[in-house]
Image (cartoon, rainbow, N blue to C red):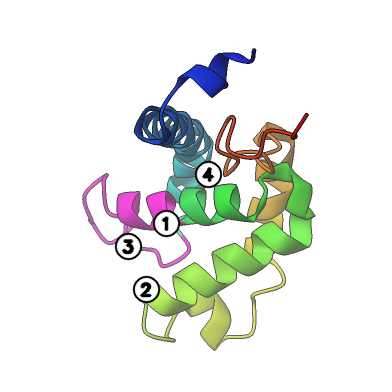
């Protein structure tokens, strides 16, 4: 008998949720320094606090995990970065406005890719789809 077969649905869900949160936090720890260093909107240069991009870094980490982590490649990560910055700055993201989306987001994605885990199994609930015997 498999370990997860003895657990009820709520226990499996709680374990999955904890595992997912751990993966998202580890990806956030990789994403945050890169986002802060690039300072695409130059907010930090204008005196914004150190945590200015924290919520954006969290959104990016969650999106990267939900899309599969390193599995999505540079283009996928670049698209996530472009979209999240575009949404958070109401379409006035500096890089998008001036047509520079190919450069800073791709450069960030290339830097992030080797540091990211493969997250394709992050959303699999253990024991939820046990093969029938």
Residue 13 at what x, y percent from top left?
Answer: 41, 36
Q: Which of the two discs, 1 and 2, labels the residue nearer the N terminus?
A: 1
Residue 120 at what x, y percent from top left?
Answer: 69, 43
Q: Marks 2 and 3: which is nearer the front?
A: 2
Q: Secondary structure at mark 1?
A: helix
Q: Which of the two discs, 1 and 4, labels the residue nearer the N terminus?
A: 4
Residue shown at 37% from the left, 77% from the top: 89
Mark 2 Cα within 10 Å, few/some/many (few <14, many 20+)?
A: few
Label 2 sits on residue: 88
Label 4 sits on residue: 34
Could you give the CA–CA distance between mark 2 and mark 3, rounded to whole angstroms? 13 Å
Q: In which quadrant of the rendered image does the C terminus lie?
A: top right
Mark 4 and mark 2 in contact? Answer it, CB < 8 Å. Answer: no
The tag on residue 59 is 1
Could you give the CA–CA distance between mark 1 and mark 2, rounded to whole angstroms? 10 Å
Vertical position of residue 109 compared to residue 23: above or below: below
Q: Secondary structure at mark 4?
A: helix
Label 3 sits on residue: 43
Q: Marks 3 and 4: which is nearer the front?
A: 4
């Amino acid at each position: 008998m498999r370990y997860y077969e003895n657990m009820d649905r709520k226990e499996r869900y709680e374990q999955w949720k904890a595992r997912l949160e751990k993966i998202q936090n580890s990806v956030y720890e990789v994403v945050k320094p890169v986002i802060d260093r690039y300072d695409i909107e130059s907010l930090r240069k204008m005196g914004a606090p150190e945590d200015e991009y924290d919520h954006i870094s969290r959104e990016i980490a969650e999106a990267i995990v939900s899309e599969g982590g390193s599995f999505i490649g540079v283009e996928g990560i670049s698209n996530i970065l472009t979209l999240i910055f575009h949404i958070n700055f109401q379409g006035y993201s500096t890089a998008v406005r001036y047509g520079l989306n190919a450069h800073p987001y791709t450069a960030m994605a290339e830097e992030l890719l080797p540091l990211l885990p493969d997250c394709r199994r992050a959303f699999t609930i253990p024991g939820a789809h046990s093969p029938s015997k």
